[in-house]
Amino acid sequence: MNPYATHLIDQLAAASEDAVHKLHRLGEHAGEPITYRVSPWITAQVADLGVRLLTRRVRHCEHVDLAAPTVMLAAAWRPGRLWCGPCLVAEGERMRGTAEDQTCDVCQTVVEVVHPVTVAAGPVLFHFGACEGCFDRETALPRATS
Ligand SMILES: [Zn+2]
Ligand SMILES: [Zn+2]
């Protein structure tokens, strides 16, 4: 294997570890439970992102450098996009209060309460919002009561 590939793999491994740490901090901060169980729907979303990365059909904010991977964020409502933390927050602000904000990413139903879910997939933290039924099916976690 060439030295560049070895270096990249080391960096990916470190970024993946960092993503898991960030997920745990997020869980503690938000009081949200963490799961290691991943549903077929989540797996399909992550696989789709992987295919887009391999075929270079991913767009990303200016702070993401695919040649030097650190933790990156992805969201189900913007397939094929990667962000740093502040840019994803800004993206979330833009859609706040819109119908999109109230749409379950799994079944595409507009609902009153969308439960946020974050999944660590390698160096990527994948975010999606789920209605009650989809949340139960995809995560098998207790819902936050707030
Ligand atoms: Zn950014
Ligand atoms: Zn749903």
Image (tube, rainbow, N blue to C red):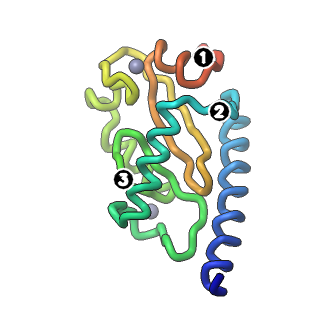
Decide which of tag 1 and tag 3 comes sooner along the chain.
3
Earlier along the polypeptide chain: callout 3 or callout 2? 2
Relative to 28, residue 3 above or below: below
Direction from residue 6 to residue 112 in the image, left or right: left
Marks 3 and 2: which is nearer the front? 3
For the residues bearing labels 1 and 3, Cβ distance under 8 angstroms: no
Residue 80: give its label: 3
Mark 2, other Cα within 10 Å: few <14 / some 14–19 / many ≥20: few
How many C-alpha atoms fall within 10 Å of the one at disc 3: few (<14), some, or many (≥20)?
A: many
Report x, y in % for residue 29.
69, 37
Q: Residue at x 31, y 19 (%)?
A: 109
The location of residue 86, given as percent across then percent down, is 48, 55
In this rendering, the answer to whether 38 lies above or below 47 is above
Please name the residue that numbered disc 1 is placed on.
Answer: 143
Look at the numbered disc 2 and give the secondary structure of its residue: helix
Residue beneath disc 2: 30
Q: Residue 144's x, y, as percent?
A: 61, 18
Label 1 or label 2, whichever comes before in sequence order: 2
Give the CA separation, mark 1 to mark 2: 12 Å
Q: Residue at x 72, y 42 (%)?
A: 24
Q: Is residue 10 left or right of residue 113?
A: right
